Image (cartoon, coloured by chain):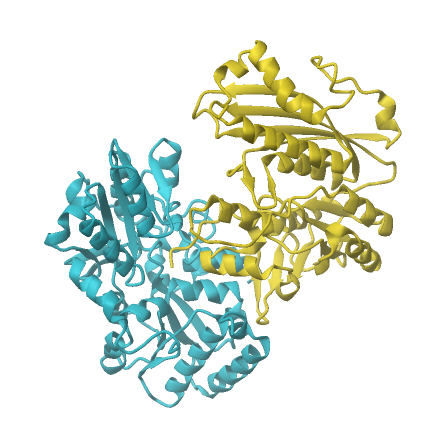
Chain colours: A cyan, B yellow
Amino acid sequence: MKYIDEFRDRDKAATLVREISKIAQSFRQDRPIQIMEVCGGHTHAIFRYGLEGMLPEQIELVHGPGCPVCVLPMGRIDDCLAIATQPGVILTTFGDAMRVPGSRGSLLQAKANGADIRMVYSPSDALTIARANPDREVVFFGLGFETTMPSTALTVLEAERDGIGNFSVFCNHITIVPTIKAILDSADLRIDGFLGPGHVSIIIGTNPYEFIAQHYRKPMVVSGFEPLDVLQSIWMVLRQLAEGRAEVENQYARVVSAGGNAAALRAIERVYELREFFEWRGLGSIDYSGVRFRKAYERFDAECRFAVPNVQIADPAACQCGDVLKGALKPHQCKVFGTACTPETPLGALMVSSEGACAAYFRYAAKAA
Amino acid sequence: MKTVTLSHGGGGKAMKDLIDEVFVVAFDNPLLAPLDDQARVPMSALTQQGNRLAITTDSFVVDPLEFPGGDIGKLAVCGTINDLAVGGAVPLFLSCAAIIEEGLPFDVLHRIARSMAVAASEAGVQVITGDTKVVQRGACDKLFLTTTGVGAIRAGIELAADRARPGDAVLVNGVLGDHGSAILAARGDMALDAPIDSDCAALHGLVGAILAAAPATRFMRDATRGGIATVLNEIALAAKCGIEIDEAAVPLREAVKGFCEILGLDPLYLANEGRLVAIVPAEQADAALAAMCAHPLGKGACRIGQCTERRPGQVVMHTMLGGQRIVDMLIGDQLPRIC
């Protein structure tokens, strides 16, 4: 068992697609069934394996907001640049945040202009850089949903334990549940069911999603990231719809439990508190959707440590990311898709990272359509 | 530890000593020996090999300088030879310009010069002229090499990307992505121990074997930066045909697959330094493939797809699952994904 090839089996995929088609044909409605995959990792898998084209036309996948790189607003990138360009600062970041455009360029451009910006693969790498450079201020660009929140929290706890004074985090961690709720509350919602995020759910478990089934009466299936995982989860959502059920089901049971990872949740609880609101590219401000450090860890908060302009910059007016995120538009139906907005010069959130729906569409599918 | 200093670049005795001690000793050959401002080559050396001169130049700035399966020196020799070879040229001579950052240990420089000499000699190519500069710390990264290659193309060989036609087979000479993975792993900044050696190798022998077995071969290119995906896109655009490849047929080492899975990289975009793509008319594809497999540098050769009339200018991959996706050109570098 290698946990890769077994989940990419062509024959099993064909069987699942047949079963999906069977159920899909039984629906009597004049519009396609819309299933949203919340997580950018799923979007990536769907395009990488060409899953969308294998599904019957009655099924429409809506690519949700779960790409933490995509949804960073321009103002936060500008703030990050303001920190990175202060004398003595080494800014450390995950690779795919390098190209996200702010109003005055990206981290990649700032690096070319002389800022000391280094790519790392985990926050603990950033802490290592801080230890090696005691005379410099090392800032980690913390971003991601609950998936990456615990590793940032544990790194801060380690810095505290070891008395490392030159390390801080520009915290842009965001939380998934308020975001799903914001989508469910939007007036023009047409989503019939959800694929729940896999990695986030390893941390938080499946319990926090119960409101989706109970209050909003929508099925959700927490899904793994291999192509068979995604196909099986789509089938599970459809089966719920066909049987008139709305439940939270767990397809990714090999790593996801109902209660989540207790140690990770403790670290999150200890280090972070909710922000009253957080700005999202494409979706606007969402209440209680971001976190910051608690008072006790304020000295590790780069926003307390450095002068940060904290400006709000509106999304470009032509952008229709919000409509795409809610499933009201397909990526290629946006009026700037592929013209003013391309992966080289992204205007909107969804064109930014390879996990963004529009970037994936542009790269993998648009021209084939 | 003896290191290179700015005085080694000053044009005086220290510089002469460095050139003699490091490069002349390693490259030793009669065309280099006079150490004049230019190497002088009898025309007959070229005309015996073909009716056209092929010339190419490439710079090498790899970090780290030494990595599993090779080093910057071997790369600088093989890379330039390959740029000649894939055009059907017999590679004959190389020049080598070295830009050295002050502080580089002599030991390292010696090892790299010797590695160049071994690679050149194995390939039957001579390094006949060169240049050495030493720059201040920070002005370059340890060592940059530029090699220019000269070769001759035999009459009758016509290889060009725009000659690809629908129906042609797309062949590769072995597993892909080894070099890119080896370099990323050797940089050590992701704490991944990957047992992967660079595929760095001079391919002119293999090219000769392909051309002998399949004289109608349309085009070849070594799949270096940007990987096979970039080469295929360039061919599709130049020939205004489509290219369809089969994911299940794309040869990848298990270690490279695992490496890419963990980092979220696509192996189709990883660099290779000893792999080429050959576009061969369908009727000669089996002969080309057999010749490749019989050559030491083509043991893992296989057919990964074909040129098509559909979707001109596009590369499409049939995924293992039975789906399809576009294989586009990359905008910049591949960046590892966050989660």
Q: Nearer the viewer, residue A11 or B13?
A: B13
Q: Is residue B239 above or below residue A210?
A: above
Pinpoint residue B259: horizontal percent, then vertical percent: 51, 57
Residue A308 visible in the shown view: yes
Pinpoint residue A237: horizontal percent, then vertical percent: 39, 81
Q: Is residue B79 above or below residue B46?
A: below
B307 to the left or right of B103: right
- Residue placed at 61% from the left, 13% from the top? B16
Pinpoint residue A232: horizontal percent, then vertical percent: 46, 79
- Residue placed at 56% from the left, 75% from the top? A9
Number of on-image labels: 0
B64 to the left or right of B110: left
Q: Residue furthest top?
A: B12
Name the quarter where the C terminus of chain B is drawn. bottom left
Q: Residue furthest left?
A: A295
Pinpoint residue A107: horizontal percent, then vertical percent: 35, 41
Residue B308 visible in the shown view: no
A358 to the left or right of B130: left
Q: Nearer the viewer, residue B293 or B58?
A: B293
Q: Is residue B45 above or below residue A241?
A: above
Q: Residue furthest bottom?
A: A243
